[in-house]
Amino acid sequence: MNKELITYDKAIETIRKSNDIQFIYKNSLYNLTLFSRKWYLAATGEENFTKELADGKDIDKLIDKLDEILIKDKKLKEIINDHLYGEGTLILFDKYK
């Protein structure tokens, strides 16, 4: 079975289409989601939080924040590009397909 490796750029492309991503990293489930016209990063598990990141239409601001934010000890770009998330847990949703 040939698995496509997901890159940070592919995840950003998904986000630009107003779609969500989710993954498990170091015993916590992380969701980047658009809810009630706002982008949030939420974690459940060892870490529990919800952070408002940007207005729903302000994708550039959201991406700037994603480039800076640390999840435990890593940037989101590192987690995705280096495949540090739990195997098979990174999901790019396509809710407007």
Image: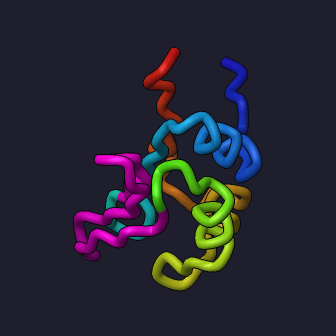
Magenta span contains residue 37: yes
Foreground residue among 68 and 84: 68
Instruction: List x then y, in percent, for residue 44.
Output: 24, 64
Residues rendered magenta in the picture: 30-54
Give the quadrant of residue 67. Answer: bottom right
Foreground residue among 72 and 83: 72
Q: In this view, does 67 lie above or below 63?
A: below
Q: Is residue 42 above or below residue 9?
A: below
Which colouring convention does the figure follow? rainbow
Question: Is residue 79 toward the left or the right of residue 31 in the image?
Answer: right
Residue beneath the point at 26% across and 73% down: 49
Q: How many marks?
A: 0
Give the quadrant of residue 25. Answer: bottom left
Residue beneath the point at 40% across and 47% down: 34
> Magenta span: helix, strand or loop, mainly?
strand
Foreground residue among 60 and 10: 60
Foreground residue among 48 and 18: 18
Instruction: List x then y, in percent, for residue 74.
Output: 59, 78
Question: Is residue 78 toward the left or the right of residue 22 in the image?
Answer: right
Q: Which quadrant is the N terminus positioned in? A: top right
Residue beneath the point at 73% across and 47% down: 7
Residue beneath the point at 37% across and 68% down: 52
Instruction: List x then y, in percent, for residue 86.
Output: 47, 53
